[in-house]
Image (tube, rainbow, N blue to C red):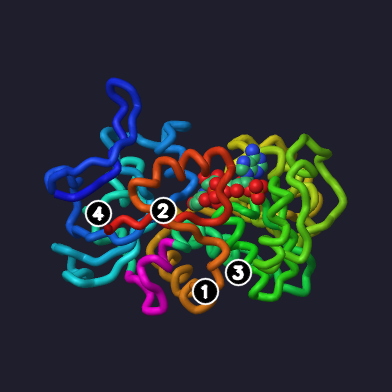
Amino acid sequence: MFNALVLEKEPTFQATLKSVEDDFLPEGDVTVDIEYSTLNYKDGLAITNRAPVVRTWPMVPGIDGSGVVRESGHPLWKKGDRVILNGWGVGETHRGCFAERGRFSGDWLIRLPEAFQARDAMAIGTAGYTAMLCVMAVQDHGVRPGDGEVLVTGATGGVGSIAVLLLAQLGYRVVAVTGKASEAAYLSGLGASAVLERAEFSQQGRPLQKERWSAVVDCVGSHTLANVCAQTRYGGVVAACGLAQGGDFPSSVMPFILRSVTLRGVDSVMAPRALRERAWDRLAKELAPSSLATVVSEVSLSGAVEAAHRLMQGEVRGRVVVRVAE
Ligand code: NDP
């Protein structure tokens, strides 16, 4: 028997911590004893039933997990290996990591870098790995620290916080956009050189505006994404990864056809293994776990539902790791 947070939709939606048997585990060739998971925006949506994230029921949420291989029928993995799992539909179509045990395809797992413990990897989680994918998109586009300011929206969130930290460490001058004016000192502590009000970006704006940013990491979509595209400098890049404001994109083609702005989509869920490994390798080299001290808070599995509600109400700063193993 092992503990799992189980989401059910009949007779009405509920999220309950339950003791379940091994036959509750889904298909897969590797069974993992999960030590830590983490609360991502998508988990918040699933646990609070705010959006149709869950596709098969009953579901165990938790798109991220880290722990130790318990049993393996996959050539890459053996008992005792320390692994990370991010995405691949886990917590959406395949039972996820808010459970003491999980079963997955061995193709989905990557090795825990030596620099990290399981908790460190989950302090980073999909949010941090997505932040690194966005940083890589900015760098791959050729934007260098001397080229001008880089904007990060949704900056106190999980992706935003780690994007600010990574970019500042690389020498970029980072401007953070937040709805939480009280967190300006937190953002400066991560390396932001200026902090701007979310309200300046969230309403409909003109299709072309004053050129300000050499690059943008956008976590919120909607009018904010349209405005930051309209403010990006000639030849710059906008790495779009999120929709915290909305999934719409009420923009025009003007920034793309008159300023050669590139809108670069960033997806972590189905990213190929080689790209994941490149991102995690860089995180292991560039992100000391101690640098996340102000970013991370921790809850137990039994505290995850309450934390998910706080996340959805915009009351969480940074990252929440979920201690799965008691
Ligand atoms: P968080 O909930 O931790 O952060 C989201 C942040 O967005 C909030 O902290 C807040 O920051 C800001 N925000 C919230 N509501 C609004 C709003 N109505 N308008 C404008 N800004 C708002 O989520 P994550 O950082 O984990 O994820 C951010 C986004 O990225 C989510 O949409 C998520 O689904 C997406 N995502 C996408 C991935 C991918 O593979 N493409 C992977 C991971 C996440 P502040 O108060 O500072 O403004």
Give how far across and how far down residue 323 sits, in percent.
Answer: 35, 57
Question: Amino acid type of disc 3?
Answer: Leu
The residue tagged 2 is 299
**Residue positioned 30% across, 67% down in the render:** 83
The residue tagged 4 is 100
The magenta-colored residue range is 111-122
Label 1–label 2 contact, CB within 8 A: no
The circle drawn on residue 290 is 1
Question: Amino acid type of disc 4?
Answer: Glu
Q: Is residue 105 above or below residue 76?
A: above
**Left or right: 50 as drawn, with respect to 182:** left
User: Which is closer to the viewer, label 2 or label 4?
Assistant: 2
Whole-number angstrom distance, CA of label 1 to CA of label 3:
13 Å
Whole-number angstrom distance, CA of label 4 to CA of label 3:
31 Å
Sequence-wise, which precedes: disc 2 or disc 4?
Answer: 4
The residue tagged 3 is 166
Q: Is residue 289 above or below residue 88?
A: below
Mark 3, ligand 1, within 8 Å: the answer is no
Question: Amino acid type of disc 2?
Answer: Val
Give how far across and how far down residue 205 sits, in percent.
Answer: 81, 38
Q: Relative to the observer, which residue lies in front, 187 or 29?
A: 187
Whole-number angstrom distance, CA of label 1 to CA of label 4:
26 Å
Q: Judge the density around disc 4: few (<14), some (14-19), many (≥20) Cα neighbours within 10 Å.
A: many
User: Which is closer to the viewer, label 4 or label 3?
Assistant: 4
Q: Relative to the observer, which residue lies in front, 141 or 53?
A: 53
User: Which is closer to the viewer, label 3 or label 2?
Assistant: 2
Can residue 89 be seen? no
Sequence-wise, which precedes: disc 1 or disc 4?
Answer: 4
